Amino acid sequence: MVRSWVPRHLVVLVATLAIAASASTANAQDKLDRALRDGKNSGQSLRVIVKAKPGYEAWARQLLQQSGTHIDAELPSINALAVELSGGQLDLCKSSVVESCSEDTYVSPSQFAASFAARSRRQTATAESFDGAKISEPSINTLLGTLGLTPSASFGYGATVALIDSGIYPSSAFDGRIKAFYDFTGGTTIAKYPFDDYGHGTHVAGIIAGTGYDSNGKHKGIAPGAKLIGLKVMDRYGRGYMGDVIAAIDYAISVKGTYNIRVINLSVAAGVFESYWLDPLTLATKRAVDNGIVVVASAGNLGQNALGQEQTGAITSPGNAPWVLTVGASSEEASSKRSNDTVAKFSSVGPTWIDFQAKPDLVAPGVGIESLTDSHTTLYQTVPSMLLSGSI
């Protein structure tokens, strides 16, 4: 008698796929986030983040490939794969190797998570006594020196900030400190030169690390000694996807030691559809924090509703997570006095939706911020009324 032999791992795989095919619809519903449940019958293709159960990543990949699904990106920080599925293909989420499925939602630019340029820097880089007298910056440098901290002239020296945004224009204000640049909007690619076709990322980069070279340092950023890595996740129209942001976070984690990445800046915002313990974006930021990187995120621009009325509970993801340093925007109310400073009307406030956490963690100047731009960007061309004279 001739006996056939089948590798044991193939037997297990076949059994797994059989289980996937027989899983209940109820279980599939439980594995979908709210955005997918609400839109699953639209008949349109959806960008989906498929999270595998721990230890089943390879099987989840094979399950998707056997269904003819193209894998757009692998997201190791959350054991997930970014794919595009039709409404009918969401049945793949029934598989016992799949832990959950979340819509790969749009992300959009938000207020600046580190808004410290121009006159705002005067508020953050100087101190004020109780009688209102200013303490000079040299005095601050002396104080910092006694604490073993870097003087303000070279704040950020030796550290690198990973800027996840629309890109960075290589202005002279960065003095050759853009050490790497990757474009995630069409798959991870190394760009020959840094660029920014939308403009938001360049503005944020100037706030963080610009030298203010064309204003004798008046408009320098808060950390002009810091190096930058540009991780482009938004296109020329300011559109991006959560999966690309997560891929950028994963990359920053992977090269943390190479570039001494100390901070990830996320001035981008996604909607909150589930707890921060389930949200793919917030979980990716947790892995970054667990790897020793400070993640700074904006609170969001939803402090008012469409009628201009104040609204609460609109902190955006990933700023809703407790391990993220969430920054709202303050307004100086067109004066140098601190006594009339207030939270900007547009800035999102807590508590956070679903988890009801107290957020933001702090506020920083975010109104009338002066920073860098480039004439080739969409923002430069579409909002000329916001431009100030100067060069980059």
Image (spheres, grey):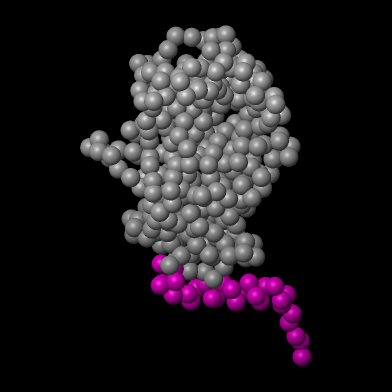
Which residue is at the far left?
A: 307
Nearer-the-camera pick, 391 or 321: 321
- x, y (%) of residue 47? 46, 50
Drawn side of residue 276 relative to residue 190, left or right: left
Q: What residue span does the magenta drawing correspond to?
A: 1-29
Residue at horizontal 35 percent and vertical 56 percent from the top: 39
The residue under the point 53% across, 62% down is: 67
Picture coordinates of residue 202, whole percent (x, y): 52, 24
Q: Is residue 355 left or right of residue 218?
A: left
Q: Residue at x 43, y 67 (%)?
A: 30
Q: Residue 12, percent across and down?
A: 65, 75
Q: Nearer the viewer, residue 48 or 107?
A: 107
Q: Is-magenta flag for residue 21? A: yes
**Considering only vertical position in the picture, is 299 above or below 99?**
above
57 on left or right of 39 = right
Provide residue 15's location: percent of width, then percent of height: 60, 77
220 above or below 253?
Answer: above
| Quadrant (top left/top right/bottom left/bottom right) for the N terminus | bottom right
Q: How many numbered marks appear?
A: 0
Up the image or down, 369 lies above or below 88; here it is above
Q: Can residue 185 be seen from the camera position used here?
A: no
**Residue at the limit of the structure toward the front, as seen here:** 131
Q: Residue at x 40, y 72 (%)?
A: 26
Quadrant assignment for the C terminus: top right
* Type of secondary structure dominating the magenta stretch: helix
Would residue 282 be visible to someone looking at this image? yes
